[in-house]
Image (cartoon, coloured by chain):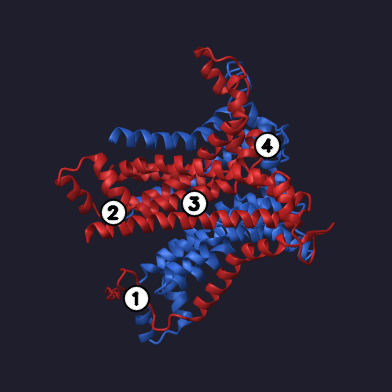
Chain colours: A red, B blue
């Protein structure tokens, strides 16, 4: 069959049809927007209702918000935000040099490493965390490994069944969510730019910090945000590793649902969305400031 | 710098895979507390096939995940096609990606409160199905979006010039071209739906899927190693055997 001449738009993508607001586009935007807005609007509305035995007593009430701040749930929210921020930062910092090295390796090695990093997305998280719990237990693998170093039984497991174990579990579970956006961002930097930096005498470290990181900044921000969001909404890691010993936002929401306290769920969810929006704005602000500074320097 | 990068990559792989490899190791030892006792054994796997409590949840998972994957693929094809051919396609795709960005626990809790507390519906397999479609859809839509960004509309123009109507052109021209993407979306959709947990936990009613079963086992602290370790190892091996070659092939594609 003869090749058909291709029409390309300015982004290199297929050319847009004449009528951009076709019915399929309108329907996609309408349904997509509805699904996107539903949890936000629903959480906000229900957070100002009060609970009844079966669900809501409709009206206006601040009981749920009062309950969140008086029952200690807000402390759980703050602690979960701290966990999520710490894990997202560590995951992003590990991902940047890892992705940079991976970009420069042979295609076969790169394909294998990427395939290996992708597979965990599809494996049951509960089972993996359950295995970690067994490894963390008294006389488990971690303590067995540390025993020759003179670490007394129970000393390490005591910490691993607490916040330290949750942090390790979160990092293990969600590191790959930060890695992929970072890798995509770094692999999209044109090779000519890196060659130019090298030709001008820039070493690996300088190229990474002065060329790669600034150019991949949006992707690095996306990796941080995605990892942060995954950690924020997790219900599996803390519960599977520590039982109920380390409460996090996800388990707090779950316990409120079990107790049919839906307005509290709404309030917690609203706080979560607010945190997500603030994080997104902060990331954008950092990127914007960096770009503006670069623009000024060029001028 | 190269040493730091290799170290970071190794750390990422170790952190990601240590629990999975440890899980497989545990499925092959006789005592999960004293690893030096008894050595390697297949006892956990024979116990797995004697205690078949995991079989109904597995069947339930497949029964729900198959139609969910088909629905997510169809919806993804529709949305990805619309976004991929639109000048502001990236923005449209971003809207479609929101269900994947919203934490599962939030989506699950919101849907539970809406369907159960507001509408008073009885939850079960159908609501888990909705949750699975919501989870798998953004990924399917992304696959189709990327495919349609590279789709040459001249093929459709050529079909129209030859007097073929839009519906016939879609079936006879477009679908064969995007066939590989349809297959990928079905596969990814199925695996994502099959392993979905945070939303299903809230929307299960009295239905138990395999991830819910395993989650309940792990949460109860009375878990049986034979079921949890053996079953998870088998699922992990099967999933990795399917996914890794697929991604490897896509990465190596010109």
Q: Position of residue A228 (x, y in %)?
A: 51, 48
Residue at mark 2 shares a chain with residue at mark 1: yes
Nearest to N terminus: mark 3 or mark 1 = 1
Q: Residue at x 29, y 48 (%)?
A: A212
Secondary structure, mark 1, is: loop
Secondary structure, mark 2, is: loop
Q: Residue furthest right?
A: A53
Q: Quadrant of the N terminus of chain A?
A: bottom left
Separation of residues labelled 2 and 1 (CA atoms): 24 Å
Separation of residues labelled 1 and 4 (CA atoms): 51 Å
Tell me if mark 4 has few (under 14), some (14-19) or many (20+) residues whose alpha carbon lies within 10 angstroms of its own. many
Q: Do the numbered discs 2 and 4 sit on residues whose CB atoms are within 8 Å? A: no
Nearer mark to the viewer, of 3 and 1 = 3
Nearer mark to the viewer, of 3 and 4 = 3
Q: Using the image, tell me which numbered label, if any, was put on residue A15.
A: 1
Residue under circle 4? B218
Q: Is residue B39 above or below residue A29?
A: above
Q: Using the image, tell me which numbered label, if any, was put on residue A189.
A: 2
Residue at mark 3 shares a chain with residue at mark 4: no
Secondary structure, mark 4, is: helix
Residue under circle 3? A226
Secondary structure, mark 3, is: helix
Residue B169 picture quarter: bottom left
Question: Is B5 or B128 nearer to us in this picture?
Answer: B5
Residue A82 picture quarter: top right
Separation of residues labelled 2 and 4 (CA atoms): 44 Å
Left or right: A113 in relation to B236: left
Nearer mark to the viewer, of 2 and 4 = 2
Q: Quadrant of the C terminus of chain A?
A: bottom left
Q: Position of residue B250 (x, y in %)?
A: 38, 53
Q: Is residue B61 above or below residue B217?
A: below
């Amino acid at each position: 069959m003869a090749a058909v001449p291709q029409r390309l738009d300015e982004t290199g993508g297929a050319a847009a049809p004449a009528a951009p607001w076709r019915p399929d586009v309108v329907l996609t935007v309408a349904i997509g927007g509805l699904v996107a807005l539903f949890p936000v609007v629903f959480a906000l509305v229900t957070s100002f209702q009060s609970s009844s035995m079966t669900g809501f007593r409709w009206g206006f009430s601040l009981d749920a918000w009062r309950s969140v701040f008086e029952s200690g749930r807000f402390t759980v929210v703050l602690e979960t935000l701290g966990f999520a921020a710490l894990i997202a930062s560590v995951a992003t910092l590990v991902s940047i040099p890892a992705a940079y090295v991976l970009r420069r390796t042979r295609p076969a090695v790169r394909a294998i490493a990427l395939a290996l990093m992708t597979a965990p997305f599809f494996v049951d998280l509960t089972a993996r965390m359950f295995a970690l719990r067994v490894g963390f237990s008294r006389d488990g693998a971690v303590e067995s490994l540390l025993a020759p170093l003179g670490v007394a039984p129970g000393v390490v497991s005591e910490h691993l069944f607490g916040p330290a174990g949750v942090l390790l579990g979160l990092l293990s579970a969600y590191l790959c969510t930060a890695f992929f956006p970072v890798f995509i961002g770094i692999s999209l930097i044109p090779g000519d730019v890196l060659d130019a930096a090298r030709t001008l005498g820039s070493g690996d470290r300088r190229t990474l910090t002065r060329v790669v990181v600034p150019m991949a900044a949006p992707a690095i921000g996306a990796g941080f945000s995605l990892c942060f969001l995954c950690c924020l909404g997790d219900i599996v890691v803390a519960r599977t590793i520590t039982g109920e010993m380390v409460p996090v936002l996800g388990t707090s929401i779950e316990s409120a649902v079990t107790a049919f306290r839906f307005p509290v769920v709404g309030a917690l969810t609203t706080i979560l969305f607010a945190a997500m929006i603030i994080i997104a704005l902060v990331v954008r602000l950092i990127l914007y400031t960096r770009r503006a500074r670069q623009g000024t320097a060029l001028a | 710098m190269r040493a730091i990068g290799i170290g970071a990559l190794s750390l990422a792989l170790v952190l990601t895979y240590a629990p999975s490899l440890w899980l497989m190791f545990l499925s092959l030892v006789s005592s999960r507390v004293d690893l030096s006792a008894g050595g390697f054994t297949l006892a956990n796997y024979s116990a797995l096939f004697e205690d078949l409590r995991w079989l109904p949840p597995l069947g339930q998972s497949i029964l729900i995940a198959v139609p969910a994957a088909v629905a997510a693929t169809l919806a993804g094809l529709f949305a990805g096609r619309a976004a991929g051919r639109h000048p502001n396609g990236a923005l449209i795709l971003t809207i479609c990606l929101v269900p994947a960005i919203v934490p599962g626990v939030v989506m699950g809790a919101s849907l539970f409160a809406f369907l159960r507390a507001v509408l008073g519906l009885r939850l079960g397999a159908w609501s888990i199905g909705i949750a699975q479609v919501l989870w798998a859809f953004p990924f399917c839509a992304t696959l189709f979006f990327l495919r349609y960004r590279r789709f040459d509309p001249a093929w459709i123009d050529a079909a129209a010039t030859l007097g073929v109507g839009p519906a016939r052109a879609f079936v006879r021209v477009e679908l064969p071209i995007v066939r590989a993407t349809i297959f990928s979306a079905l596969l990814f959709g199925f695996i994502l739906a099959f392993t979905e947990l945070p939303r299903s936990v809230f929307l299960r009613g009295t239905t138990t899927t395999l991830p819910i079963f395993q989650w309940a086992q792990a949460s109860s602290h009375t878990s049986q190693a034979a079921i949890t370790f053996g079953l998870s190892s088998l699922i992990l091996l099967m999933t990795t055997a399917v996914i890794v070659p697929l991604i490897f092939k896509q990465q190596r594609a010109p």
